[in-house]
Image: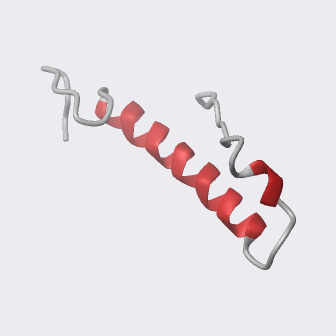
């Protein structure tokens, strides 16, 4: 299993537990970063990068 580095911007941290959707926004940001990393790993290229090995 590959390791992923997930970061949440400083602008999102203060509202982590405040408001009704504070935590939901953070979980969404983290999940999107993980999915992006998995797609890059599967395709063998980063977003908008074109390589000979890219399969999708």
Position of 14 with respect to 33 (left or right) is right
Judging from the image, the colouring scheme is secondary structure
Q: How many marks?
A: 0
Residue pictured at 81% horizontal, 75% vertical? 19
Residue pictured at 77% horizontal, 65% vertical? 23
Residue with the most extreme top position: 52
Position of 14 with respect to 46 (left or right) is right
Q: Nearer the viewer, residue 14 or 17?
A: 14
**Which image quadrant for residue 45?**
top left
Residue with the most extreme left position: 52
Q: Nearer the viewer, residue 36 or 43?
A: 36
Q: Quadrant of the N terminus?
A: top right
Residue with the most extreme right position: 17
Residue pictured at 56% horizontal, 44% vertical? 34
Residue with the most extreme bottom position: 20
Q: Quadrant of the C terminus?
A: top left
Decide: is 11 above or below 15: above
Decide: is 18 above or below 27: below
Residue pictured at 82% horizontal, 53% vertical? 14
Position of 12 with respect to 1 (left or right) is right
Q: Position of residue 38 (x, y in %)?
A: 46, 40
Decide: is 50 above or below 29: above
Q: Position of residue 37 (x, y in %)?
A: 48, 37
């Amino acid at each position: 299993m590959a390791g992923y580095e997930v970061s949440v911007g400083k602008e999102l941290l203060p509202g982590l537990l405040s408001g009704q959707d504070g935590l939901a926004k953070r979980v969404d940001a983290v999940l999107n970063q993980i999915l992006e990393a998995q797609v890059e790993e599967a395709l063998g290229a980063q977003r908008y990068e074109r390589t000979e090995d890219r399969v999708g």
